Image (cartoon, helix red, strand yellow):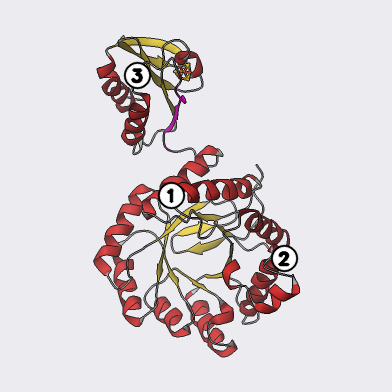
């Protein structure tokens, strides 16, 4: 997997692009005016592995609260701005590490120039966001509907608007809920631009549907080396977005930290409540900083063999459980002791 070259830019204390790790983002879903709730949410997201957080800034009160929130969290905070250039400036004055705007709807060239001037003074990156839902009418007409070409042209037009103000500290995102269109748009833009790309499938849906769409779309792009920062957009708790983003990166071998749990699909040989056990194991291992694979298998016949790829595993036998290392049975014990035995092994893992 060869990463496409992009310029490095710094969002607060996190660098993206270049050879930097692909950063995981999410977005707060409380009104930004509510300082306490947002601080609490961001601290929980940080703990789960979120590396950049975005908050909407629709009012001056929100901009002020944004400044308070920023002081109490540890990851870079991005301000999401719609329409009002004053909010973009207020967010930057309150410590925004990046702003996300659509230069086409911020109130005209002069207002954009004012926003860029403040960004330039403070060296704050600007994310240019293009969304398939708001593609300009002339581009819809030119390309006979909303297309990947139209989205790319729209994004490049907007990038040029910022470049014309003499600023190149830019990140690009092109969002669509249509996976093939979104993938094609990112492929096209990565051919013609070396600005870092924030990738994600927008309005992907509920946790189930959104995870599948995001895994497919992001999976293709990341495998092609495209994407410097990602967001899995889900209609659900933002913590789920972080869990999913981490799982996508881990399943492609891009991130290695954290335990990967593999478990068999169960069959007629299953001798244990494997579904319950696999979920318990997944919950139990989520905070271990180990780069290993743990297998949870349903039977003693094929379990050890099928768990060969894992560093450690457990399997359910008849009236007993097995502890397995690299496919070899190392201990037999009552089923009720399996989880505890696995935990003890992980606690002492070397
Ligand atoms: S490990 Fe055993 S229980 Fe699980 S799918 Fe394979 S044969 Fe079935």
Pointer 1 residue: 207
- Estimate the x, y position of residue 220 in percent, counting from the top left: 63, 46
- Asked whether residue 228 is in view, the answer is yes
Query: Looking at the image, which residue sits at the far front?
Result: 268
- Asked whether residue 170 is in view, the answer is no
Residue at image position (56%, 55%) is 228
Left or right: residue 288 compared with residue 37: right
Mark 2 or mark 1, which is nearer to you? Answer: 1
The numbered mark, 3 or 2, whose residue comes first in the sequence reads 2
Pointer 2 residue: 149
- Estimate the x, y position of residue 67 in percent, counting from the top left: 33, 73
- Between marks 3 and 1, how big is the CA–CA gap? 28 Å
- The segment highlighted magenta reads 258-266
Disc 2 C-beta below 8 A from ligand 1: no
Pointer 3 residue: 272
* Disc 2, SS: helix
The mark tally for this picture is: 3
Left or right: residue 244 compared with residue 349: right
Q: Residues within 10 Å of mark 1 (few under 14, many from 20)?
A: some
- Between marks 2 and 1, how big is the CA–CA gap? 29 Å
The numbered mark, 3 or 1, whose residue comes first in the sequence reads 1
- Estimate the x, y position of residue 236 in percent, counting from the top left: 38, 54
* Disc 3, SS: loop
Mark 3 or mark 2, which is nearer to you? Answer: 3
């Amino acid at each position: 997997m060869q990463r496409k070259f992009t310029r490095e830019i710094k969002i607060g204390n996190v660098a993206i692009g270049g050879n930097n790790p692909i950063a995981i983002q999410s977005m707060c879903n409380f009104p930004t005016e509510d300082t306490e709730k947002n601080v609490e949410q961001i601290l929980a997201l940080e703990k789960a592995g979120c590396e950049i957080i975005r908050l909407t800034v629709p009012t001056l009160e929100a901009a002020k609260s944004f400044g308070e929130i920023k002081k109490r969290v540890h990851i870079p905070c991005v301000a999401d701005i719609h329409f009002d250039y004053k909010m973009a400036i207020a967010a930057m004055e309150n410590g925004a590490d990046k702003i996300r705007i659509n230069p086409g709807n911020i109130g005209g060239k002069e207002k954009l120039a004012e926003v860029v001037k403040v960004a330039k003074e403070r060296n704050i990156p600007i994310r240019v966001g293009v969304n398939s839902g708001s593609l300009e009418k002339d581009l819809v007409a030119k390309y006979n509907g909303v297309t990947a070409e139209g989205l790319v042209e729209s994004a490049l037009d907007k990038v040029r608007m910022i470049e014309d103000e003499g600023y190149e500290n830019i990140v690009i995102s092109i969002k669509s809920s249509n996976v093939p269109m979104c993938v094609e748009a990112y492929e096209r833009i990565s051919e013609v631009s070396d600005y870092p790309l924030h990738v994600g499938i927008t309005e992907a849906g509920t946790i189930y549907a959104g995870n599948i769409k995001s895994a497919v779309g992001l999976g293709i792009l990341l495998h092609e080396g495209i994407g410097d920062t990602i967001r899995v957009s889900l209609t659900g708790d933002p913590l789920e977005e972080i869990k999913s983003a981490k799982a996508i990166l881990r399943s492609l071998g891009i991130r290695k930290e954290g335990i990967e749990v593999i478990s068999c699909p169960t069959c007629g040989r299953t001798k244990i409540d494997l579904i319950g056990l696999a979920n318990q194991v997944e919950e139990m291992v989520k905070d271990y900083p180990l780069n290993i694979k743990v297998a949870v298998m349903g039977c003693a016949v094929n379990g050890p063999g099928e768990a060969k790829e894992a560093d450690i595993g457990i399997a359910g036998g008849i009236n007993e459980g097995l502890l397995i290392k690299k496919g070899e049975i190392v201990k037999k014990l009552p089923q009720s002791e399996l989880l505890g035995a696995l935990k003890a092994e992980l606690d002492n893992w070397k």
